[in-house]
Amino acid sequence: MGSIMHIRTQIRNKVKDVLEAQSIRAFDPVMGTLFEKQLPCSIVEISSCNIDPATISSGFRREFVITLNIVHKAYEGVDDVIDEIMAKAEKALIADSFFKNKISPLQEKIKDNSDGDQPIRTVEQIFLFTVYTTDCEEIL
């Protein structure tokens, strides 16, 4: 019997697949050092999960906070590039058959890091994904 991926891993991998289908580089948060040639990219995190008993069935209502950290070199015009990536990511996730009617944008935050020789801009694009499950692991 093959091992079952944890539900957060399944969702993170699905988000990465959707982004990569839109030519957006997507990585796990533990992938290591980002190099200039990998920018712009999105680091996909499942930053939290709330689990409540469902009222309709014997399953669970799970709310996942999905955070896309869109990272790029900070230079004049970078906001236009990041805005385009964010629009493509949001449109693709909302339209995807798995996420459709279960995902919604929550907020966006801009962070600049000027440590090192190249300033970096990171924009957090945060989504709420709600799914009802009867199995604690398998959702895809």
Image: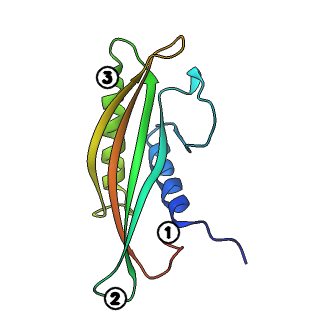
Mark identifier at residue 67: none
Please, what secondary structure does the residue beneath circle 3 have? Answer: helix
Q: Quadrant of residue 123?
A: top left
In front of the other: 4 or 47 = 47
- Nearer-the-camera pick, 81 or 60: 60
Q: Which residue is mark 1?
A: 140
Q: Position of residue 38 (x, y in %)?
A: 56, 27
Mark 2 vs mark 3: which is more N-terminal?
2
The single residue placed furthest to the front in the displayed view is 115
Instruction: Determine whether the residue tagged by mark 1 lies in a helix, strand or loop.
Output: loop
Residue picked out by circle 2:
57
* Disc 2/disc 1 C-alpha distance (Å): 19 Å
Mark 2 secondary-structure assignment: loop
First reached walking from the N terminus: tag 1 or tag 3: 3
Looking at the image, is mark 2 or mark 1 nearer the viewer? 2
Give the residue type at disc 3. Asp
Q: Report x, y in % for residue 116.
A: 54, 14
Q: Residue at x 40, y 46 (%)?
A: 67
Q: Which residue is mark 3?
A: 79
Q: CA distance from mark 2 to mark 3?
A: 45 Å
Task: Please name the amino acid that badge 2 sits on.
Answer: Ser
Q: Is residue 19 above or below residue 64?
A: above
Q: Could you say which quadrant of the image residue 76 lies in?
A: top left
Marked residue nearer the N-terminal end (2 or 1): 2
Q: In x, y percent, where is residue 99?
A: 36, 61
